[in-house]
Amino acid sequence: MSFALYIAGALIFIGGLIYGAVLLEVPMQWIAVGALVTLGLACLSAVKVTRQKDSGE
């Protein structure tokens, strides 16, 4: 799978979490912190899964 597909999925997931947090009246600064942490974890995970293996030559 491609890196862009992972990030697109992560953005949809984060959007859903933000929507739920707004409905629960969570303070905006905590919504922003949660979104940034989740995006960072998604990027790390996407890079780990989609990186090319070294040939070792």
Image (cartoon, grey):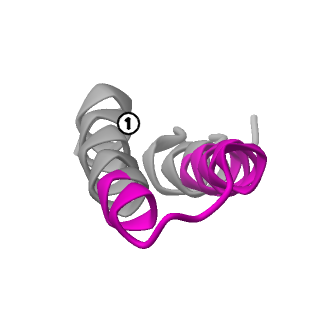
Q: In screen coordinates, is 8 left or right of 37? A: left
Q: Position of residue 25 (x, y in %)?
A: 50, 64
Residue visible at 68% across and 42% down?
A: 32
Rendered residue at 24%/45% (across/down):
12
Range of magenta residues: 19-42
Measuring from the top left, give residue 48's x and y in whole percent.
60, 54
5 relative to 6, above or below: above
Q: Amino acid at mark 1?
A: Ile
The answer to which image quadrant residue 38 occupies is: bottom right
Whether residue 30 is in magenta: the answer is yes
Which residue shows up at 68% across the image and 55% down it? 27
Q: Is residue 24 above or below residue 16?
A: below
Q: Residue furthest front?
A: 25
Q: Residue furthest top?
A: 4
Residue 2 is one of the magenta-drawn residues:
no
Overall secondary structure of the magenta section: helix
Q: Which residue is mark 1?
A: 7
Disc 1 element: helix
Q: Nearer the viewer, residue 31 or 42?
A: 31
